[in-house]
Amino acid sequence: MLELQNLSFSYPGVDVLRRVSFMLPRPELVALFGPNGSGKTTIYRCILKSLAYSGSIFLDGEDISKLSTQSIARRVAYVPQEHEPPFPYRVLDMVLMGRTPHLGGIFGPAERDRHRASEALRQVGIEDLSERAYTRLSGGQRQLVLLSRALSQDAELLLLDEPAASLDFGNQLLLWRTIHELSRKGKSILICTHDPNHVLWFCDRVIVLGRDGAVVADGTPHQVITPTLVRDLYGSECAIATTHGRQVAVPPACPVRVCS
């Protein structure tokens, strides 16, 4: 579905990505994990043809350099970390914007597009928000709306850029559980995150970028997320404990207490 071959990108005097290669051959939930400045968001911008890169990117075997913006938008949907619209759009109208790559002519959205937008709201469980103003929602609700908009796009691949970064703990779990459920229903999802616990709890696979913009590890979270890796990436010590059958990254001097 998605393949990167020796993807590199530089600003003048600064290498951001260094020969990044990986494949997403099947539907799964894959984390892009690494510190700030390691190039995670830059990978997304290259996939969306927002940056002039070297190397190759393929979607379903086709080089994206030969694909139109509309063709890419029909295959790839992007969810930013946060979004502040200039107008208080209705939630349904925000989600309907995801249908833009599929619109034809000058007559705007058809009834089938409105139906798909409503269906996307139901998929995420927020159909009750459809008539609310997007600007009046909580941060967690806004992220779910953006996820619904991406689903209405009917793309094969979702790119999520640290969608839980500004959310409180409850909304983080709500968002991640929703994303996990979508992946189980057949969506391919590539998601940026800084949190090793989110990777351990929810993801099928993790691709790790080092500070030099190169891939340093690629595998299952339980294989890849280790105290050594976290120390090398962030300069912080941690331990990997197990509670209730789940692994969790904790400070080494912080015992895990099981609360009943």
Image: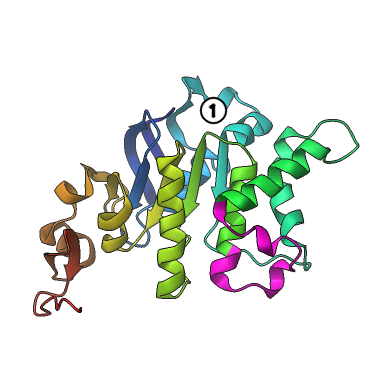
Report the quarter where the N terminus lies: top left
213 vs 88, nearest the viewer: 88
Coloring basis for residues: rainbow
Residue 105: x %, y % from top left: 87, 31
In this picture, residue 82 sits left or right of residue 254 = right
Snapshot quadrant of residue 236: bottom left
Depicted 227 relative to depicted 112: above or below: below
**Magenta-drawn segment:** 124-142
For the point 17% across and 60% down, which residue is it?
247
For the point 90% across and 36% down, which residue is it?
106
246 vs 15, nearest the viewer: 246
In this picture, residue 204 sits left or right of residue 112 = left
In this picture, residue 218 sits left or right of residue 157 = left
Depicted 256 relative to depicted 176: above or below: below
Q: Please, what is the three-letter code of the amino acid marked with disc 1?
A: Ile
For the point 65% across and 34% down, which residue is it?
69
Residue 175: x %, y % from top left: 46, 61
Q: Is residue 99 visible?
A: yes
In the picture of the structure, the residue carrying the numbered disc 1 is 64
